[in-house]
Amino acid sequence: MRTTINPLAELKSDTAEMITKSIKEWAEKEVMPYRHEIDDNFEMAERAMKKLFVDIGMQKLLVPESAGGAGLSFEELPPILYHSFSEIGKADAGIGFVLSALVASSASAIGSEVFDFMVDKLSSGFCRVSIVPPQFGNDDFRGFELAKAVEKGNKIRIKFYGRPLNSGFDADLFVVFCNYDGVSLAVLDGEEVERGEIVKTAGLNASRNCDVRIKAEVEKSRIIKGDAWKRLEIYLNLCLSSLCVGSAVDSCRIVGDWAEKRFIRGKPLKDNTVDAEVLGEVAKEAIEASMAAQFLAKSMLEDRSDDEIHTLSAITALKCSGAAFNVADRAMELMASQGYAREGLLEKQWRDAKSIAALLNQQHSLLELSERFFASKLWER
Amino acid sequence: MEFARIREFESPLERYLAEMIKDWGEKYVLPYRREFDEDWKEHRYVEPALEKLMVGYGFQMGVFPGEFGGWGIGNSDYFGSITARLMEEIGRYDTGIAVSVGVTFWPLFMITVKPHINYDLCAEFSELFARKKLTIAANAMTEPQGGSDIENLDELRGKTIRTTAVLDGDEWVINGHKLWPTNTGGMADLFGVVCTTKPGEADEKYFAYIYIPANLPGVKQGEPYRKAGMAADKNSDIWFDNVRVPKHYRAWGEGLDAKYFREIIATGCLGSAAMTLGAMENIYEILYEKCGELRYRGKPLKENTAVAAVLADIAAEIEVSRAAVYTYARMLDRPDIYGERYSAEMVARGRALKLKVCDACCDVARKAVDLLSHYGIDRSFDVEKHWRDVKMVQLWMGGRQLCQMDVARHFYDCKQL
Ligand SMILES: Cc1cc2nc3c(=O)[nH]c(=O)nc-3n(C[C@H](O)[C@H](O)[C@H](O)COP(=O)(O)OP(=O)(O)OC[C@H]3O[C@@H](n4cnc5c(N)ncnc54)[C@H](O)[C@@H]3O)c2cc1C
């Protein structure tokens, strides 16, 4: 079964290969044996996360070598993220989702004063970072509501109530989209955030989320101004896209095994044309997603504007999350009860992929694309 | 908001039952619905709700003819419409409970629906269901090697069934292994079991539908399986090991069992479509409320044209689905006009209905989750629960592909499918 393509030559590197190998071993040892139970047992997910984040060092990809990290540069990062998140997506998209937020947040902070504050956290044990994106509510920023940031002497007072993207219940750091100087990111210590009860969700169970209340006063140095939010979104989109590629490939693997072994009308499922057509569609989607994610990773190595990459990353994330969901959804069609059963493993990919797709808010992203490519005036008041 | 249907065809009994279900759903399901997912194994919340409906409100006896103390749904001139309405109204609250109730009636349809009412078996089994105790039936078709081929009667004619029934004097001796039937995992009191009297033969005369009380020696139900959704329905393995039942527990006999079993397919398709219709209506109700509350671009979500267009698509799907469900239901009401419910034509129409309405429902649920974004995947908004639950309705009874094949076979006169 070949539902993957050889990666683009530009995306190959020894470091990427080494990290991917470690992730593969991690998945085999820490996730795969427990995958059907992991959603009911957060401790299992947490144990696996700790190994990936701390022991393998995925939370320290951007931490300077002097502070015990890998000290990767922006030139090295995209291929490594593509390969490593694709690998994680084959095992547990929820864990990859939590890591995506951490990597994207650290990438957004590089070069700013707050980076050292983050490095301290990232290099002193298991760490989760929660992103607090704009929310349904008032129209502060492209139709959504931002956390309020008000200057108070030398400090900035941040006020917010709502739902983070991920890990609100467990995060050690919060990166909050706020209305300071246009749009900025405020980096808060977990202790500055009041948390509600864990919300139960359809999937991505490694990310325990809750509504949070923020009423914090922080130094100005904790605010990242300018286009940092765009960089955060670019890296988040790359990580999530790659994660979804992995998820799609895993769903293909699962349904491929099934279609080989399961007999319908006296022959393997895959030899019935109606089912083979579904398998063809599933393979097409997975490969398209992988092409899109690789194109994004490669584009990030080229000399392109942040704006262009930002747009490309949004398109790629939509494409890949949609593909991961479609692949799992159509694969489930062919696996029927076995696909729907927890032990069949597919249903976890199905719930996780759908959750990522829903969180990416497709409709809003399409409006942003229309604004960019057709100059639609959508945000003017 | 009531979605489209021809109201002239609504029977008084149907309206009355719908009101009872609403009363039950608001009191005994909604307050506990968010606990159902964790309750998949124990049914600490599910079972009392089911018991209330079946015993408290009396639905358990619904299909038996009046002379046996039932409501006579099976011999009513509104059989299809009432069945659809029950599934629609229960499906609004929970499709898992809907299938549990529907599948209790399902095997009994073989013997309680006119013109094929088996009075002897009705007399015997109605006593079981008349007890003031939750009594549940299961329809055991699917086997480890596959469910679709067993339901693919027109092509395979029972050839792949491995559960055997051998006549020994006045008793059938049953051996076999079934899996997945609704209401198993220890719940069922009575099974309707699809068996073969000659394994490997593709001939409908060997297709046997035999009732097996769950408390007989040799019957074993496994532990319930964990699933993506449908927590209110328990499913497990069932083993029949030299189980002996009286000869008259075979529903009808050679040829007739397969013939009336097609009606099981037709009603299963109607019930599946109707319960997903109910789920869509509940999704609509949730969206109506939440898209008014959540704000985007300075106004309620629903006042944004891009969102309104999706909401419109959702409403349109429900509108057309409801019209289709009740059209088919009405056709099942009137075999005198539209032909026997077990005819190839009515089965194909049922398959077409299930295919279309289940696809519509999965699409509606998917769009609703997307619209609400992080609230869409939040279990306290209930939309994602429907999204997880209804997927299985699309997949069961042979899934989309068997539906497609049965529809193509009939509507295009295909000979080799
Ligand atoms: C919640 C739940 C409730 C259920 N309730 C019941 C019940 O009450 N009674 C019962 O007996 N079973 C029940 N089932 C089982 C269900 O009906 C079967 O899963 C279903 O019929 C498909 O069978 P299978 O899973 O064995 O898949 P298979 O039969 O192996 O089919 C796999 C796939 O093959 C494809 N396929 C099917 N037919 C054809 C064809 N003719 N040509 C080409 N491709 C085809 C379809 O994509 C199908 O999904 C239930 C399952 C669940 C999860």
Image: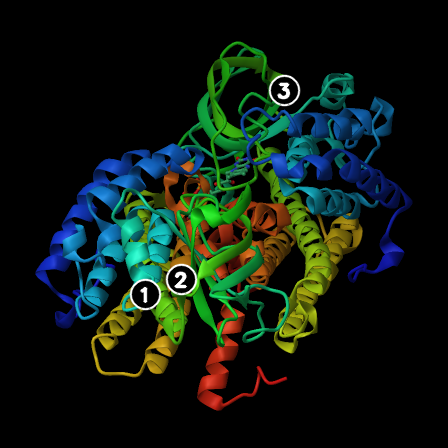
What residue type is disc 2 on? Arg
- Residue at image position (11%, 58%) is A15
B361 relative to A86 in the view: left or right: right
Query: Who's the residue at 66% across and 68% down the image?
Result: B301
Mark 1, ligand 1, within 8 Å: the answer is: no
Determine which residue is flagged by label 2. A222
Reading the image, the residue beneath label 3 is B189
- For mark 3, name the chain: B
Compute the Cα span from label 3 to label 2. Answer: 65 Å
Mark 2 or mark 1: which comes first in sequence? 1
- The image's colour scheme reads rainbow
Q: Closest to the observer: B335 or B79?
A: B79
For disc 1, the marked residue is A113
**A312 and A236: which is toward the camera:** A236
Mark 3 vs mark 2: tell me if same chain.
no
Residue at the extreme bottom of the image, as rendered: A375
Q: CA distance from mark 2 to mark 1?
A: 7 Å
Instruction: Give how far across and how far down residue B226 sits, in percent.
Output: 47, 33
- Asked whether the residues under marks 2 and 1 belong to the same chain, the reply is yes
